[in-house]
C-alpha cells in the first residue's frame, strides 16, 4: 500500500473514531486526521500547526538562553511571551508573539495565525480566560486581554500594518476577520 493510501486509511479511521457516524467520503486524498470547531482538519493544516509550534519553542529557547539579546524583536516589533490558561485543559500555555503596538502598558496583539482561516489556539484560550500574563523585556506581569471592538480595530489596524505589512497580506489570505487583542494591566 502506498504512503498516500496509508494516510488516507488512517485519516478515514481517525475521522470515524472522532466523529462516529459523520464520515464524509468527499474528504478526498488528503488525509483528514482531527477535528477543530467540529470541522475536519487536513494533514497539511496539522503539519503547519506542528511547524508553528516548533518554531515557537525554538524562538522561546533562544530568547531565554540569550536573555533577550537575540530575537528580542522581529521585523522591528518587540517579542512578548503570552501566558494563557488552556480553555479545555485548564493547563498553563504560552506562546511567543510580536507586539506591533505598545502604548505604555497597553499591548496590542494580532491573532493572524499567518492568514490561516482558523483562529490561533492562544486567542481562543484568552477568550475563555481573559486574565493572562505577558512577559516583556524579561518581566512577567498580569494583564487582562480582550478583543478590540470594531471601532478600536478601525483605528488600530493601519498602525498594525504600518508596523508590519505582512499583517495586511495575512488578512487578504483569509475571509476570517483577523482579531486584534488589547492587553492592559489588571
Image (tube, rainbow, N blue to C red):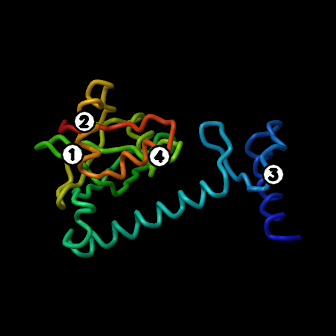
Q: Are marks 2 and 1 in contact (CB under 8 Å)?
A: yes
Label 3: which secondary element: helix
The residue indicated by pointer 1 is: 101
- Above or below, 57 against 30 in this view is below
Mark 3 to mark 1: distance in Å? 44 Å
**Crowdedness near tag 3: few (<14), some (14–19) or many (≥20) residues, C-alpha within 10 Å:** some
Res 154 → quadrant: top left
Q: Are marks 4 and 2 in contact (CB under 8 Å)?
A: no
Q: Earlier in the sequence, mark 4 or mark 3?
A: 3
Label 1: which secondary element: strand
Label 2: which secondary element: helix
Q: Earlier in the sequence, mark 4 or mark 2?
A: 4
Quadrant including the C terminus:
top left
The residue indicated by pointer 2 is: 156
Label 4: which secondary element: helix
The residue indicated by pointer 4 is: 121
- Above or below, 51 against 168 in this view is below
Q: Are marks 3 and 2 in contact (CB under 8 Å)?
A: no
**Crowdedness near tag 1: few (<14), some (14–19) or many (≥20) residues, C-alpha within 10 Å:** many
Q: Residue 99: image x %, image y %?
A: 25, 50
Amino acid at each position: 500500500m502506498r504512503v498516500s493510501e496509508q494516510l488516507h486509511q488512517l485519516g478515514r479511521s481517525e475521522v470515524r473514531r472522532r466523529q462516529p457516524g459523520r464520515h464524509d467520503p468527499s474528504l478526498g486524498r488528503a488525509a483528514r486526521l482531527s477535528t477543530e470547531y467540529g470541522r475536519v482538519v487536513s494533514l497539511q493544516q496539522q503539519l503547519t500547526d506542528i511547524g508553528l509550534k516548533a518554531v515557537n519553542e525554538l524562538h522561546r529557547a533562544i530568547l531565554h538562553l540569550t536573555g533577550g539579546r537575540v530575537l528580542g524583536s522581529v521585523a522591528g516589533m518587540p517579542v512578548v511571551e503570552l501566558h494563557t490558561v488552556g480553555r479545555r485543559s485548564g493547563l498553563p500555555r504560552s506562546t511567543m508573539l510580536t507586539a506591533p503596538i505598545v502604548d505604555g502598558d497597553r499591548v496590542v496583539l494580532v491573532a493572524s495565525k499567518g492568514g490561516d482561516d482558523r483562529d490561533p489556539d492562544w486567542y481562543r484560550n484568552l477568550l475563555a480566560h481573559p486574565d493572562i500574563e505577558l512577559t516583556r523585556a524579561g518581566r512577567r506581569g498580569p494583564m487582562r486581554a480582550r478583543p478590540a471592538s470594531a471601532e478600536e480595530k478601525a483605528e488600530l489596524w493601519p498602525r498594525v500594518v504600518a508596523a508590519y505589512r505582512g499583517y495586511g497580506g495575512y488578512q487578504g489570505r483569509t475571509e476570517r476577520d483577523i482579531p486584534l487583542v488589547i492587553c492592559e494591566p489588571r
